[in-house]
Amino acid sequence: MVNFVNRKIRSLTLGEKLKKIRKKSGISLAEMSVKTKIKQDYLKKIESNSFEKMPFDVYIKGFLRSYAKHLNLSSEKIIAQFNKEVGVRKNVRRYRKKGTKKFKFEMTGFIITPKMVSILISVIIFLVGFSYFYLEVNHFSRKPNLVIEAPKSLNSIDSSSVEIRGFTDLENKITINNESIFIDSKGKFKETIGLQKGPNEIIIEASNKFNRNTRKIINIIANYELDTLETENEKNNQSENNLSPTKFFVEIESREVESYLTIKIDDNEKQVNILYPGTILKIEVKDQIEISSGKASNTYVRINEGEFFVLDKEKDGLKTVNLNKNGITLE
């Protein structure tokens, strides 16, 4: 008689595959953190498939794309496997819930009628619905998260400008001194602000779709010599004019409803932003800009303070255009 031996065949998870490829490439976790600009703690959770302990899926997918890029892997295949594993975990959780034993409640002399069961079920449904509604409203209506990494308030600097850096939640809008700025796919923002000589007050504000706001104020004292500054500005302007004769400004506006935008400026990495109605983004461009809008008929653009034009009057969905200082170059 032939004896058969049962062996379990276990395939590697996405995190295990990435960890194996990284080690085979001779890249340490610290080196990968520096290359991808992702915290080591998040990299460890990715390689251990602990995605439930990380932020929203949109952040995880951004991390995975960056990870795949630095390992020369296909980001599409990585994201596809991630989506597949997430679906499997959800199915397993549903299966386990269905397989739990029902609790039997018995009480001597107590009769449960169909009417009582109906009332009890109605009460449970009401409580569950109310709890879900309360949690959702509380989540979206609370004040937006806003963290300023630099600079610190009450600083004294010998410069005519300062760089503001920080981060917020991806769905929020950020303004600095009432001017909208871009938020990247990780919720980070960075903007250089001009300063007048002496005391300066910089107001950074985060707002969400429920008009809840978080405001932070930075006070900076600028100590610089005006004559020196004017000379430096003249040199910089001459240098910019010589190097970038095609530089221009693009303004993007959403009018009736919010628009989900993906923007690539020159050869820089694509940035994701949510543009709310009544908000205008002003962007400085050297050569060309690529704009993708999920609401093409609601997104308006103008170049160098010319006339606004809609990306696509007929198309309400996704539209991608490339522009230079003369207008649309490729649809």
Image (tube, grey):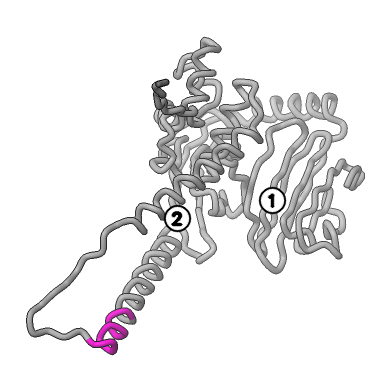
Give the camera-side residue of 96 and 240. 96
Bounds of the magenta span?
113-121
| First in residue order: circle 1 vs circle 2 | 2
Give the camera-side residue of 150 and 110. 110
The reply to whether callout 1 and callout 2 are in contact (CB within 8 Å) is no
Q: Is residue 188 visible?
A: no
SS at badge 1: strand
Rendered residue at 62%/45% (across/down): 182
Q: Position of residue 202 (x, y in %)?
A: 51, 46
Q: Is residue 296 left or right of residue 184?
A: right
Q: Is residue 82 left or right of residue 124?
A: right
Give the camera-side residue of 174 and 196. 174
Rendered residue at 49%/45% (across/down): 88
Q: Is residue 295 left or right of residue 97?
A: right
Can you identify the residue that label 2 sits on?
Answer: 144
Rendered residue at 39%/22% (across/down): 3
Q: Position of residue 188 (x, y in %)?
A: 53, 40
How far apart, in angstroms, are the residues tagged by discs 1 and 2?
20 Å
Position of 188 relative to 303 (above/below): above
Mark 2 neighbour density, 10 Å: few (under 14) some (14–19) many (20 or more): many
Q: Position of residue 304 (x, y in %)?
A: 83, 48
Q: Main secondary structure of the magenta part?
A: helix
Q: Is residue 307 visible?
A: yes
Residue 261 in magenta stretch: no
Residue 261: give its label.
1
Residue 120 in magenta stretch: yes
Residue type beneath disc 2: Pro
Q: Position of residue 25 (x, y in %)?
A: 55, 12
Q: Is residue 89 left or right of residue 274?
A: left
Position of 103 relative to 97 (above/below): below
| Residue, far left | 108
Residue type beneath disc 1: Leu
